[in-house]
Amino acid sequence: MISAIIVAAGKGTRMGANVDKLWLEVAGRPVVAHTWRQFNDPDSVDEIILVVRDGMQPHFAALAEKFHFQKPFRLVAGGVERQDSVWNGLAALSPLSEIVAIQDAARPCTTADLIAATIYIGYNC
């Protein structure tokens, strides 16, 4: 099983006060929706773990519904630091996971081909 962890628990403080870059609209949808779609669409990924700020789970569930993300996903609360958030995502993986791709939610331009190539390299290490 191939899993993806999308880390979306940061505050984006470098963007300035009251701006969360994950929710900025680009081409009609929030940045995080573009990132999620990149992992939702390819067959190379079986499950998605989204690590989000605690309390944001309803917003992400609504996003999945609005954009019809069909791949199995779980929402996990992030930690104090990025490494804590990644750890929380790893702890939530299916026990059947063999390869894990970890993606920053604010990086929506990772292509399906790059995701597949990364997974392929992981299998052949």
Image: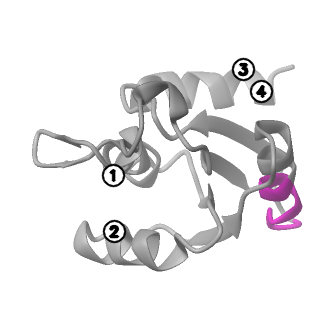
Give the spatial CA distance, label 4 vs label 2. Answer: 30 Å
Examine the rendering and report whether any part of residue 50 can be seen: no
Residue denoted by label 2: 63
Give the spatial CA distance, label 3 vs label 1. Answer: 26 Å
- What's the amino acid at mark 1? Ala
State yes or no: discs 3 and 1 in contact (Cβ < 8 Å).
no
What is the crowding at mark 1: few (fewer than 14 residues within 10 Å), some, or many (at least 20)? Answer: many
Q: Position of residue 16 (x, y in %)?
A: 41, 30
Residue 36, placed above or below residue 73: above
What is the crowding at mark 3: few (fewer than 14 residues within 10 Å), some, or many (at least 20)? Answer: few
- First of labels 3, 1 by sequence position: 1
Q: Which mark is residue 33?
A: 1
Q: Position of residue 120 (x, y in %)?
A: 67, 27
Q: Which mark is residue 121?
A: 3
Give the spatial CA distance, label 4 vs label 3. Answer: 4 Å
- Pick the residue in front: 107 or 58: 58
State yes or no: discs 1 and 4 in contact (Cβ < 8 Å).
no
Residue 102, placed above or below residue 29: above
Q: Mark 2 or 3, which is nearer the eye?
A: 2
Colouring of the image: one colour
- What's the amino acid at mark 2? Leu
- First of labels 4, 2 by sequence position: 2
Residue drawn at x 44%, y 69% is 60
Give the spatial CA distance, label 1 vs label 4. Answer: 26 Å
Residue denoted by label 4: 122
State yes or no: discs 1 and 2 in contact (Cβ < 8 Å).
yes
What is the crowding at mark 2: few (fewer than 14 residues within 10 Å), some, or many (at least 20)? Answer: some
- First of labels 1, 2 by sequence position: 1
Q: Residue 42 lies in magenta, yes or no?
A: no
Q: How many marks?
A: 4
State yes or no: discs 4 and 3 in contact (Cβ < 8 Å).
yes
Instruction: Say which quarter of the image contains residue 27.
Output: top left
